[in-house]
Amino acid sequence: MTMSVLTIVRNRAGHLAKLIEGLERSTVSPAELIVIDMGSTPPVAVPETAFPIKIDRLVAECLPLAASRNLAARHAVSEQLLFLDVDCIPMAGLIKKMSDALAEHAALICAEVLYLGPDDARGCWDEGELKRRARPHPVRPFPSFGVRREDNAGLFWSLAFGIRKSQFTALGGFDEAFTGYGAEDTDFGFRTQAAGIPLMFMGGAGAFHQHHASEDPPLGHFDDILRNAQLFRSRWNFWPMEGWLQAFAERGLIDISADKLTVIHRPN
């Protein structure tokens, strides 16, 4: 079966170049790479590759993460979809592994992502060396090979995952009521579970996460996180992103009640 690879990007040309380089090293080429440009300046440019690359542009005031992933899926020609965040470098065996797993399992399948240090994969890179240097996620254990069912839908993450397009379409994709940053992927995981689609973790070939600066907690996304957290709470009856919300509360920015977030003052 063929597989479409999908990514979304805003102003991360270097990361996108490494993602494409990883796809070019793949043991099985993708049917296509679909790139949704969320307002990069300058607009995204890509090299010539052995596989086609399609670029579309979707610009909104807030990062349109949910809408952009949905747009990418609508463009896809393949039944098998592999979503990669732009800061991921796919391993050479990822497409083959994910394609085989999706052929066998009608599931939402997360590939393992290993985290690189600040100096890794900055120039020429070797996959074996990156594997030796990279670190696994501290709270998301993956099998060493094959797939394992994961019953905690809250552990779904959108960095690197596969799903059949027919299932993604039937679910309605990511809920575009979540605008900007935060909780749209957790909501997708729970809606997938509610629809009877199992979540699976896949070991073996996965992806490398390229190091980049980040805020913890992400104060730059303060409004998005509060709005999306409130929407998620109204739907699922618990708070998502608890670590970030608690960090906001500890800084005196918000008050968290049983079912409401109240802004005390905004970060500057």
Image (cartoon, helix red, strand yellow):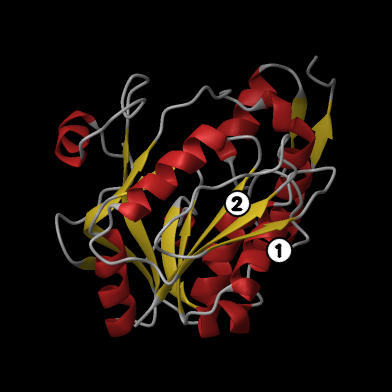
Asked where in the image residue 148 lies, by quadrant, the reply is bottom left
Assess disc 1: are there few (<14), some (14-19) or many (≥20) residues with their C-alpha within 10 Å of its C-alpha: few
Looking at the image, residue 107 sits to the left or right of residue 221; the answer is left
Question: Vertically, is 178 above or below 32?
Answer: above
Looking at the image, residue 51 sits to the left or right of residue 176; the answer is left
Q: Amino acid at mark 2?
A: Ile
Residue 182: percent from the left, percent from the top?
A: 65, 45
Question: Vertically, is 108 above or below 7?
Answer: below
Which label belongs to residue 251?
Answer: none
User: Mark 1 — residue?
Assistant: 235
Judging from the image, what secondary structure is the residue with disc 1 in?
Answer: helix
User: Mark 2 — residue?
Assistant: 8
Asked where in the image residue 136 lies, by quadrant, the reply is top left
Q: Are marks 1 and 2 in contact (CB under 8 Å)?
A: no
Residue nearer the viewer, 264 or 142: 142
Residue 191: percent from the left, percent from the top?
A: 58, 71
Q: Amino acid at mark 1?
A: Arg
Say which residue appears at 61% left-offset and 29% top-offset.
246
Residue 69: percent from the left, percent from the top?
A: 62, 61
Alpha-carbon span between mark 1 and mark 2: 26 Å
Say which residue appears at 58% left-offset and 64% top-offset.
188
Whichever of labels 1 and 2 marks the residue nearer the N terminus, that label is 2
Front tag of 1 and 2: 2
What is the total number of numbered labels drawn onto the structure image? 2
Judging from the image, what secondary structure is the residue with disc 2 in?
Answer: strand
